[in-house]
C-alpha cells in the first residue's frame, strides 16, 4: 500500500511538472506567433521600401526629367555632372552636381517640383550668387545644387528569397 501512495505522489509531482512544461510551451508558442506576425509586417514594409528605391536607376531618364522640370519653370540648367557613387549596406547613392541660371522664385518652384517626383531625390548642398544688377525687379542668380538619388543594392537575403520563390 505504501508503494502505491509513493507512486501516486510521484505521479502527481510528474503531472505537476508536465503541467508547468505545457504552460511554458504554450507561452513560447504564443510569443512565437506574435513574432511571426511582427516579422511578416516587417517583410511587407521592406517590400514596400524596395518598391520605392529601385535596383536599376535609369540615369538618362532621370536627367531628362530634371532638365524638363527646370524648363517648365523657366530655369536654365547649364550642366549636370555625376560624381562618385557612395555605397552603403542597402543602397547606393548617386550624386549629381547641377548648375543653373534663373531667378530665385524659379529655383524655389523647381525644387518643389523635384520633391514631388516619383523617384527619391534629395537636394543637399546648394549655393547661389547674383548674376545681374541688384537694383532690377528680378535679379538673375546662378548657382549649383547637389542632387542625390538612390538605387537599391541587392543583398544575399534577396537572392535567397528570389531563388526560394522560383523553386515553389
Image (cartoon, grey):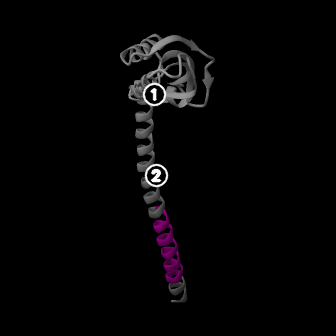
Where in the figure is residue 95, as x and y percent of width and height?
57, 21
Q: Out of 64 and 118, give the one closest to the viewer.
A: 64
Name of the residue lying farthest toward the left: 72
Name of the residue lying farthest toward the bottom: 1
Residue under the point 46% across and 10% down: 60
With 71 as the anchor, is 98 left or right in this view? right
Where in the figure is residue 15, as x and y percent of width and height?
48, 74
Q: Out of 14 and 150, give the one closest to the viewer.
A: 150
Q: Is residue 23 part of the magenta span, yes or no?
A: yes
Where in the figure is residue 159, as x and y percent of width and height?
51, 26
Q: Which residue is mark 2?
A: 35
Q: Is residue 47 part of the magenta span, yes or no?
A: no
Where in the figure is residue 59, as x and y percent of width and height?
48, 13
How many neighbours does mark 1 have within 10 angstroms: few (below 14), some (14-19), or many (20 or more)? some
Query: Looking at the magenta stretch, what is its main secondary structure?
Result: helix
C-alpha gap between disc 1 and disc 2: 31 Å
For the C terminus, give its image quadrant.
top left
The label nearer to you, 1 versus 2, is: 1
**SS at badge 1:** loop
Specify start and end residues of the magenta stretch as a single range.
7-25
Residue under the point 40% across and 34% down: 48
Residue under the point 49% across and 76% down: 16
Residue under the point 51% across and 28% down: 122
**SS at badge 2:** helix
Instruction: Give the number of the disc on residue 120.
Output: 1
User: Could you tell me how many numbered marks the image carries?
Assistant: 2
Amino acid at each position: 500500500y505504501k508503494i502505491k501512495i509513493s507512486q501516486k505522489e510521484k505521479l502527481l509531482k510528474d503531472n505537476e511538472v508536465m503541467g508547468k512544461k505545457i504552460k511554458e510551451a504554450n507561452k513560447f508558442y504564443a510569443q512565437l506567433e506574435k513574432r511571426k506576425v511582427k516579422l511578416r509586417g516587417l517583410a511587407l514594409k521592406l517590400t514596400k521600401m524596395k518598391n520605392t528605391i529601385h535596383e536599376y536607376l535609369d540615369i538618362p531618364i532621370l536627367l531628362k526629367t530634371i532638365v524638363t522640370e527646370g524648363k517648365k519653370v523657366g530655369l536654365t540648367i547649364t550642366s549636370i555632372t555625376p560624381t562618385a557613387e557612395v555605397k552603403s549596406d542597402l543602397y547606393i547613392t548617386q550624386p549629381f552636381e547641377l548648375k543653373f541660371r534663373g531667378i530665385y522664385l524659379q529655383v524655389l518652384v523647381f525644387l518643389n517640383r523635384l520633391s514631388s517626383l516619383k523617384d527619391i531625390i534629395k537636394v543637399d548642398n546648394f549655393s547661389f550668387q547674383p548674376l545681374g544688377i541688384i537694383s532690377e525687379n528680378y535679379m538673375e542668380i546662378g548657382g549649383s545644387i547637389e542632387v542625390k538619388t538612390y538605387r537599391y543594392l541587392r543583398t544575399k537575403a534577396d537572392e535567397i528569397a528570389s531563388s526560394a520563390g522560383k523553386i515553389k
